[in-house]
Amino acid sequence: MFNRFAKYEDAFRAWRRDGLPGLNADSYKYIEFLTSKDDDQVARTGTLWPHQWESFLRVVYAHEILGKAELGTDGLLLNVVTGGGKTAVIAAVIAWLRIAHNVQKFVMLCPNLIVRDRLQDDFQGGKVLNDRDLLPEWTHNRPQDFVLTTLGSGKEGGWASLFSASVILGNIHQFYLSNMSGQSNLSALMNGPEFALFNDEAHNSPATEYEATLKRMRDKVVLRVDTTATPDRADGRAPDSDMIYEYSVTDGLVDGIIKTPVVYQPDIKTVQLTYTDARTGEQRKVEEIDWAEVDRLGLNATQWVTDDEPMRQQMAIALRRLEEQERRAKKRYQPILFVVAVCKADAEKAEQTLNKYFKVKTLLVTEDSDEAERQKARELGKQQKTATPYKAVVSVLMLREGWDVPEVGVILLLRKFGSKVYGQQVIGRGLRRVRVKGVEPTEPQICAVVDHPKLEHQWLWDIFNAKKRTGVLIDDAFDETEDLPPPPPKQDFEKPHLAIDVPPVDPSFTDDGEFDVGDIAAPPKPLENWRQALEGITYDPTVVEITKVSIAGVVGQELGGKGWKTIHSAPEESSPTGPVAQVSDEAARDAVKAALLDMAELLTVEAGYAATFKDQVYSALLHHVRAKFLNGSSLGLAERGEVDFAWKMLSQVKTKVAAIPGLIAGVIEYGD
């Protein structure tokens, strides 16, 4: 996303150097209150960190000196890494607007309940305003004067609370016109005084109704400030606000604001494969192959982390890292293992394996978890003082943006990321530093991420500037927390006067010219007889399971800085007696449905159609699976054994359906 403030950097620096000319008197006095007595270019100790100070001053400059007509018509965006303390910047802007501009009402929007609850903890009773010493005595504003009402918490009182509260916190859906409650809440806002708007996790705002709601509020908004750590979405869309400040992962590593991510992957030598009849469970053959030959078999990437034996080995690696983190914590806090699964079935399997096989107390959080379980997840850091604390949490999509438990010290990936945004959000759960009694601000902290080479996440590690240190043997001693190399020099914008504006697209311009696209084969014609083609597919019930993996060691790689690579010893071989995990009936059926939905969307897009056509493809695939594997029964009524059979055969379904030219196009063009 383009930094719209770039061309103003020279003028901004001169403005700060010359004593902030042009500010109104109260703004000047408030900034003076926050400024260090020893250096007028930095904030007073205990208020804002250096990058928070830079964010805050740019907001002030954009609002008072430049004005909305010049910058920020639809808001100002701060792009700050997870763990960078965006909440403190929001609090400082709130205090400044109340003191210098007499703004009495502030609205904070968020995309989900996890983010809402975090913000509620920060602003209840003006906590963050008090903790950061953001209210000078001469203003007679006290933290408790910023009365908070949280929509959906059971504590709000309708229109009355919306009118009387100073700070209104709500999920964006609570202002949508598509529901009666949202209509009422939005009406209350629009019939009240002007307000400042804070849009947290703003990368969600390009959603159609989200964006429409923001536009409806615009006429009443004095100032809108968006915050996010991931503004660049996988679909190419971005918030409509103007980005004025970037504080990246690299910046956070340089300043010691976040933990250093370290990725660990198994160094695999040989693999044992077992061929089994998916219908009967009959074992057909076993073979051991060299790691270099694995690719020819075309195994599903997630098998390397979800088949029983590989999962246990990945968990053993993760638990070894957890033990290391516990030694570093020295009983000042309890490090947490965060396990990320792709579906509820895998999550249940992971939770049971950790609880029953490894005897590690583990919490499972999915979309079906009740509020009590979700509350436990939000308060994991606080629960570590109990006699038997949770040491691990397993999640499916639930714990991402806004879930901030600094004690997360190890992340185990049991899924492949396709989205750059989601991948960064998950890793971000482990970047927040632990700040408790006895932990010095300068103490090195790492977040260990256990990955697998077959998940092909190098693009994600490139985002974190991954580099390697070679020549370290298995038996070499290496303490990451004592020997982290210095980070690279921080990159500054040295010549802002050379920045240029990206010219807007001329709506009147049309290109009717021709250009050479080379020899491109025409797409296959849609099959009119797609039903017969689908029905004619035959399947081999033989499935391949990874039943043993020989690991030479575990490769550890620091992300960011000059980087290093070290090799740790391999985990001991597991020897479970009997099945360790039993996936619930509901989770098994849900897994088949979710996989078919994902398959339908992927096949639809690969066939050259918009994803909106996936419903027709899903219906065709579901009927196909019912006929081939469920004995004609619906997914809800089929026998459990048939459901398991279908689950094991889905990879073949994807391969064989995709191999028939024009089949998916035929479903879309000629389907009912």
Image: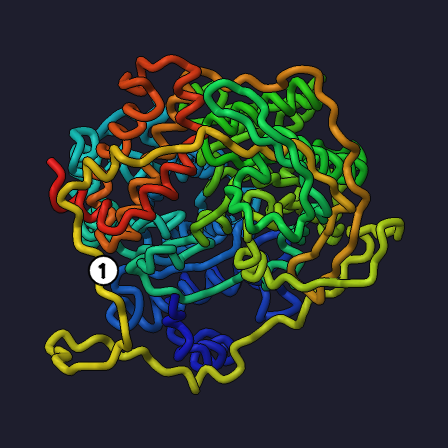
Residue 53 point in image, percent of width and height: 53, 61
For the N terminus, give its image quadrant.
Answer: bottom left
Q: Is residue 194 above or below residue 41?
A: above
- For label 1, the residue is 523
Residue 111 point in image, percent of width and height: 35, 41
User: Three-letter amino acid code at disc 1?
Assistant: Pro
Q: Nearer the viewer, residue 99 or 386?
A: 386
- Direction from residue 213 to residue 363 in the image, left or right: right
Circle 1 packing at 10 Å, graded few (<14), some (14-19), many (20+), is: few
Residue 107 point in image, percent of width and height: 32, 44
Quadrant for residue 632, please give it. Answer: top left
Q: Is residue 189 above or below residue 248?
A: above
- Direction from residue 384 to residue 165 in the image, left or right: left
**Residue at position x 58%, y 48% in the image:** 454
Q: Nearer the viewer, residue 101 or 402?
A: 402
Say whether residue 599 is visible: yes
